[in-house]
Image (tube, rainbow, N blue to C red):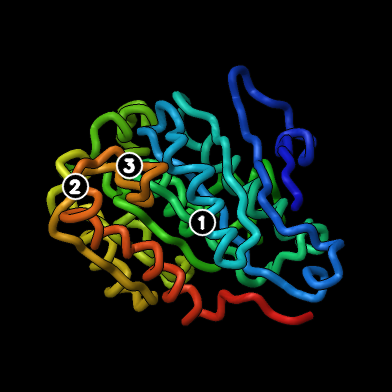
Amino acid sequence: MIYEKVDLYRYFGIERGEQAEGYLTAYVPDPLVPEIKAKLRPGMLVIPGGGYWFRSGREKEPVALAYLREGYCAFTLDYSVQTLFPVPLLEAAMATIYLRENAAKYGLDPAHLAAIGFSAGGHLAGMLSMLYEEPEIVSVLGERAKNARPDAVVLSYPVITMGERTHGGTRDVITGGHEELLQRLSLEKRVSKKAAPAFLWHTQEDDCVPVENSLLLAAAYRKAGVPFAMHIFEHGPHGLSLISPETSDQTEYDTQLASVGKWFSLSVDWLKSRVFAVKPV
């Protein structure tokens, strides 16, 4: 298995800002092993949440390992926190570009690279899907920016709007309260036919990031004619991650919340329907 950490700023020759991070960690079956070398695998970039204030460990490595077990080349992104747009988006764009430029090294299918984001990480994955050619990104990455869009996104209880039903902490960190950014980063207003197909899931009881965030995005996808799937579960609080023993301390794990954990297998099946699968070379 390839387990390594990549400095994205160093790879792109970009000066790292003060307190910036921007590291990618790979969890990939060793492509030098003969039986693995003969296969091309889909990729999954995992973007944890945390309100752009921190990165949740529960939504990071356990998720990468879960997709690894499903045959994916899995990667996690340590994006910069407590910083304004566009820094996190730039780092996410660098991650997907790096993966496509180094696909052969990892045995990765560059045409089937997905991203999954949770909460604020869902907002970042959504931005990566829609805003990858914003002027701030193109000015740094040039023509390479066109290769930043993932081929699909899985958005888990995502922050979508910067409007009335947003999560205030996420909004304040990424926009700094600037009116222009409040408009530009409300993703339900930015959906176009170029957006990546999306799998959304949320719970009705989420009182941190209201379910209206996913509903707003689904309506925008529907209007734009972009493929999507959505699952709204009745019960469960915010931040459920995989709802597994290693990611959840919910006492109701075996009963009320057990059905919500099906989101993961549903996402895998949806991705398979979009030909995200291990293929012979």
Residue at label 2? 252
Q: Which of the marked residues, 3 or 1, is nearer the chain's N terminus? A: 1
Q: Is residue 129 above or below residue 247?
A: below
Is 218 displayed left or right of 65 in the figure?
left
Q: Name the amino acid, label 1.
A: Ala
Q: Secondary structure at mark 1?
A: helix
Could you tell me if residue 166 is visible in this image? Answer: no
Q: Name the amino acid, label 3.
A: Ser
Please rate how many residues cluster around mark 1, counting C-alpha atoms within 10 Å: few if below 14, some from 14 to 19, many from 20: some
Residue at label 1? 66
Q: Position of residue 147 (x, y in %)?
A: 66, 61
Marks 3 and 2, how far apart in space? 10 Å
Which numbered marker is on residue 248? 3
The quarter of the displayed image where residue 38 is located: bottom right
Q: Name the amino acid, label 2.
A: Glu
Asked if labels 1 and 3 touch by Cβ distance under 8 angstroms, the answer is no
Q: Secondary structure at mark 3?
A: loop
